[in-house]
Image (spheres, rainbow, N blue to C red):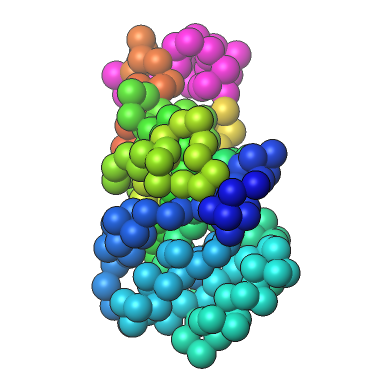
Amino acid sequence: MPAASRRHGGRHELGQNFLVDARVTRRIAALVPPGPEPVLELGAGDGALTRRLADDGRAVTAVELDPGRAAALRRTLGGRVRVEQADMLAFRFDGAHHVVSNVPFAITTPLLRHLLDQRGWRSAVLLLQWEVARKRAAVGGTTLLTASWWPWYEFALAGRVPSAAFRPRPAVDGGLLVVRRREFPLVPERERGAYRALVRAAFGGDRVAAALRSRGPRIRGLVAAAGLGSARPRDLTADQWAALHRRANRSR
């Protein structure tokens, strides 16, 4: 095995592809909002992004599952970075901070769900597969996952990362997704369950009105009143989903 492959020994079956392009680590670090809040890195790997964040003067906690890599990070960066040997899918965190992650492709959806369920963090910069990043940012139409979280988070696509920036080199490019917690949610937290039930039902068909037919004439009237009678679920905006929920909630 070539030396570069040993050094960056990511495993394709785990979706591990480590960053080796300093231009990309600079781009990611620049997307983290300035300020005194600490940064949590999920899946630090060999520490390419960890070093960049530490060099920028950020207070960094690096989470890495592999004990050998976590030990190496402590040896090289322990004086500047707090290193936690832990599973990013089980790691719990609190306090105001930002999150960054070169997400292993194999656990993208579980990691997103885990992250969005956490409290306290303000923004996240995530390196995902290009097409996944586009979907989460609702480029070309939204998805059930994004619509389910839209009232509480904003999702934005921040650029493409060529596959050559990784080792081992994956078959697809990466994409940078920026997630920001809304200062003023579009739907109250206490109504999350009802909102998500409406979204799931609406995504059960090609058109919002048809998918919600089983809920009776009242909800069909609300869909029509919102001007969404012929709309596809994928085409609704965050504001339209929230408005439809409010109409449904008021009419109970």
Which one is in front, 158 or 196? 158
Q: Residue furthest bottom?
A: 79
Q: Nearer the viewer, residue 63 or 186?
A: 63
Q: Left or right? Give the position of 9 relative to 243.
A: right
Above/below status of 145 relative to 83: above
The front one of 57 and 170 is 170
Whether residue 239 can be seen here: yes
Q: Is residue 240 visible?
A: no
Stretch of the chain drawn in magenta: 201-227
Q: Is residue 2 above or below residue 31?
A: above
Res. 182 image quadrant: bottom left
Task: Determine the image quadrant of residue 244.
Answer: top left
**Residue at the image position 60 percent from the left and 68 percent from the top:** 63
222 vs 211, left or right, is left
Residue 212 falls inside the magenta stretch: yes
The residue at the point 45 percent across, 54 percent down is: 19
Q: Main secondary structure of the magenta part?
A: helix
Residue at image point 57% right, 41% down: 105
Residue farthest front in this picture: 2
| Figure label count | 0
Residue 231 locus on image (x, y percent): 36, 15
- Taking the magenta stretch, the answer to whether it contains residue 115 is no
Residue beneath the point at 33% across and 29% down:
139
Q: Position of residue 50 (x, y in %)?
A: 46, 70
Residue 99, horizontal then vertical, whole percent: 46, 64
Residue 149: x %, y % from top left: 48, 44
The image shows residue 193, relative to residue 184, as above or below, that is above
